[in-house]
Image: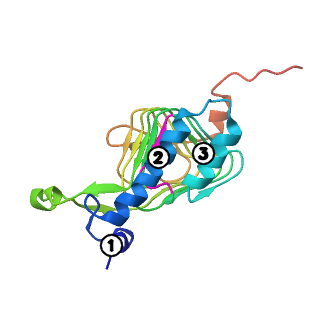
Amino acid sequence: MTEKEKMFSGYLFNGNYDAELERERNIAIDLCYEYNLLRPSDVNAQQKILRQLLGHIGENVTISAPFYCDYGKNISVGDWFYSNRNVYFTDGVNITIGDHVFIGPNCCLTTAEHAIDAGQRISGMEVAKPIIISNNVWLGANVTVLAGVTIGENSVIGAGSVVKHDIPPNVVAVGIPCKILRNITEKDKFRYPVFDEK
């Protein structure tokens, strides 16, 4: 079994010293470099690179530079996606993002976990677990989503949170570690003033 096959099968794999994985990471790193040097107004060039870099990209996707990822091809982004600046995806395995997802600045989604045993870790061993961000999720600034997490649809993750366990749909969750604060209710429609022209 190759290191890449181990990576996608949930086994410890050697991510640091494998030529195939290193080659794939270098392609993604170079594409991220090119992307991050583009003028912010050059949307056509941005979309061209994103379509080369990511495994799937929906309609009306905006990823503000700088943006970084490990492989790119393991990332699937739905329609009407927006991420702010300085977002990093360590996508050893799949990161699946639904429609209408907002990601604040300085966020990290990491499928990677390094070995706890020092000998295994020093030898380059790690494991990767997929991440799912469902439709209509908002991650506030500086959120970290750890390996193996699923965030349910419509949920909001408060700024600075570290998400290490699944979050159900329709909740506000915050903290380190991230915990459910409350359900999202009809009252939230009136949280902010709405201008009425009548």
- The residue carrying mark 1 is 6
User: Could you tell me the amino acid type at mark 1?
Assistant: Lys
- The residue carrying mark 3 is 101
Rendering coords of residue 83 (x, y %): 56, 38
User: Could you tell me the amino acid type at mark 3?
Assistant: Val
Name the foreground residue: 167 vs 26: 26
Rendering coords of residue 69 (x, y %): 44, 48
Rendering coords of residue 82 (x, y %): 61, 40
Asked which secondary structure carries label 2, the reply is helix
User: Could you tell me the amino acid type at mark 2?
Assistant: Asp
C-alpha span from label 1 to label 3 = 30 Å
Residue furthest bottom as drawn: 1
Image quarter where the C terminus lies is: top right
Name the foreground residue: 117 vs 68: 68
Kindly identify the residue that appears in the image at 45 percent across and 43 percent down: 68
Asked which secondary structure carries label 1, the reply is helix
Rendering coords of residue 176 (x, y %): 32, 39
- The residue carrying mark 2 is 30
The mark nearer the N terminus, 2 or 1, is 1
Kindly identify the residue that appears in the image at 41 percent across and 52 percent down: 26
Q: Of discs 2 and 3, which sits in the foreground?
A: 2
Q: Is residue 150 above or below residue 13?
A: above
Indicate the quadrant where residue 13 lies. bottom left
Q: Give the magenta part as a residue range.
A: 66-72
Q: Is residue 173 left or right of residue 195?
A: left
Indicate the quadrant where residue 130 lies. bottom left
Residue furthest right as drawn: 198
Q: Is residue 172 above or below residue 73?
A: above
Kindly identify the residue that appears in the image at 32 percent across and 64 percent down: 19
Q: Is residue 7 magenta?
A: no
